[in-house]
Image: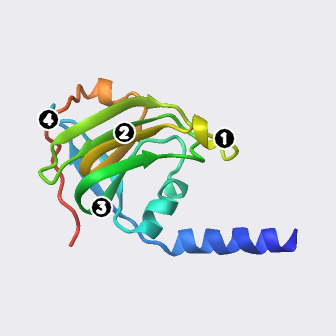
Amino acid sequence: MRKTVIFVLVILCLAACTRYHQIQIQFPNGNSINVLVADSYKKQEFAWQQQRAPFQTGVLFVFTREEEQAYYRKNTLLDLDVVFLDNNQRITAMHTNVPHREKYTIDAEIPFAFATAKYLLELPAGTINKQQLSVGKTLLFSLPS
């Protein structure tokens, strides 16, 4: 029990010490959303722990280069929309209403998705339809230096 408590405290400390930039992403229809930028493995691992309820923002995962990326989410509390973007911030693939999966979900039941991308954008479920996103459309954003 004591080891578990120490482990949880270490994880919480690591998450709290990780600083996330927040940027605004503009959709083609002119609407925008604020997102956290997860531009390192450590930030990607703890990104959802930084969210506050109700969930009103997204997370932009930034990869080192454009290549085939895998989407695999376990331990999520919310249903999500997932958008893959290329180097030019153009949508290459999308998945709507990806169901949440709890910690003890067996791997065979966890959603997988693959697409060529430089960025992966996770949004609240329903955002893709609400913002009328489609493959080929471009999102606008600037990353912090």
Where residue 1 appears, as percent x and y from the top left, is 88, 68
Question: Which residue is under mark 1?
Answer: 105
Task: Give the Cα separation between the discs numbered 4 and 2.
Answer: 14 Å
- Locate residue 130 relative to residue 89 in the image: left or right: right
- Locate residue 32 relative to residue 21 in the image: left or right: left
Mark toward the start of the polypeptide (1 vs 2): 2
Mark toward the start of the polypeptide (3 vs 2): 3
Residue 43 to residue 139: above or below = below
Task: Give the Cα separation between the discs numbered 4 and 1.
Answer: 34 Å
Where residue 120 appears, as percent x and y from the top left, is 32, 49
Task: Give the Cα separation between the discs numbered 1 and 3.
Answer: 26 Å
Q: Amino acid at mark 4?
A: Lys
- Residue 58 visible to the viewer: no
Question: Which residue is under mark 3?
Answer: 63
CA neighbours of label 2 inside 10 A, class few (<14), some (14 to 19), many (20+)? many
Where residue 108 appears, as percent x and y from the top left, is 59, 38
Q: Amino acid at mark 3?
A: Phe
- Residue 28 visible to the viewer: yes
Q: Amino acid at mark 2?
A: Val
Marks 3 and 2 in Cβ contact (< 8 Å): no
Question: Which residue is under mark 4?
Answer: 137
Query: What residue is shown at x 14% (from left), y 34% (from top)?
Result: 136
Mark toward the start of the polypeptide (1 vs 3): 3
Secondary-structure class at tag 1? loop
